[in-house]
Image (tube, helix red, strand yellow):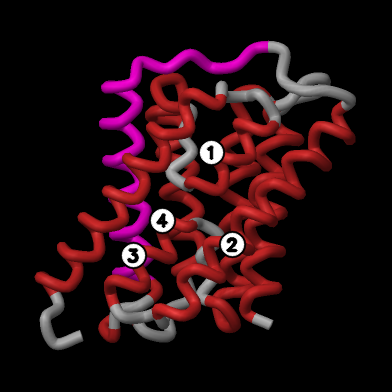
Amino acid sequence: MKYVYEFIGTFFLVLTVGLTVLPPGGAGNFAPLAIGSILAVMIYAGGHVSGGHYNPAVSLAAYLRGKLHSEDLGIYWLVQLLGASAAAFLAVYLKGGYSPVAIELNPLKALIAEFLFTFALCFVVLNVATARATSGNSYFGFAIGFLVLAGAYAVGTISGAAFNPAVALGTSIMQISVWSNLWIYLVANLLGALAAAYLFKTAHPNE
């Protein structure tokens, strides 16, 4: 069931991205509010079953931190990417077409922005959702959702603010971002996850 939950959470995250960004009737500057909110509530819905990752980078950080089994990592990645792909195609169908304009990125600036905010996202996830000191808290979902919301406003015009390879795949399918940008997200997001996991393990050696 945890794989189903990861599919569902990633699906609704990417569907919300598509429906709030694609024309006609996009949410414009309010899109990050919807995206951060859907992520928060889906984490509350699925966190107790799957961990509520909905993001291959978060799954990698959880694996490196020791909170995800190695046999689950590949399956999490698969269902997250499948959920993102299904959501992207549905968003295109519901909106009646692909994005007419794809974002143009400066590769170096986008790499820096995606690395920093994916690091911040994974750092927050590990500290509010996996640390013993914060076990049982009631704020973890919104802490994570608000990080994505803040990051989208901060660097959305620089990198597209994916912070998530599954979201990056979805935006590529919807032609919000060109396919040639995908490598930027994969490299920056996974390196951000790696850095966050090792910092957490250094700061919490007994965990």
For the point 37% across and 84% down, the residue is: 135
Instruction: Give the alpha-carbon distance from disc 1 to disc 2, as whole Å.
Output: 14 Å
State which quarter of the image contains the C terminus.
bottom left
Residue 81: image tag: none
Q: Earlier in the sequence, mark 3 or mark 2?
A: 3
- Residue 38 visible in the current orientation: yes
Instruction: Give the alpha-carbon distance from disc 4 to disc 2, as whole Å.
Output: 13 Å
Q: Amino acid at mark 2?
A: Leu
Q: Nearer the viewer, mark 4 or mark 2?
A: 2
Instruction: Give the alpha-carbon distance from disc 3 to disc 2, as whole Å.
Output: 16 Å
**Of residues 70 and 147, which is closer to you in this image?**
70
Residue 28: percent from left, percent from top: 65, 23
- According to the image, label 1 marks what residue? 168
Q: Is residue 195 left or right of residue 1?
A: left
Residue 40: percent from left, percent from top: 57, 59
Residue 39: percent from left, percent from top: 59, 55
Q: Residues within 10 Å of mark 4 (few under 14, many from 20)?
A: many
Q: Earlier in the sequence, mark 1 or mark 4?
A: 4
- According to the image, label 4 marks what residue? 57
**Of residues 143 and 200, which is closer to you in this image?**
200
- According to the image, label 2 marks what residue? 78
Q: Which residues are magenta?
A: 101-128
Disc 4, SS:
helix
Q: Amino acid at mark 3?
A: Ala
Q: Nearer the viewer, mark 3 or mark 2?
A: 2
Q: Is residue 98 above or below residue 199?
A: above
Q: Is residue 143 above or below residue 135?
A: above
Disc 3, SS:
helix
For the point 41% across and 61% down, the residue is: 58
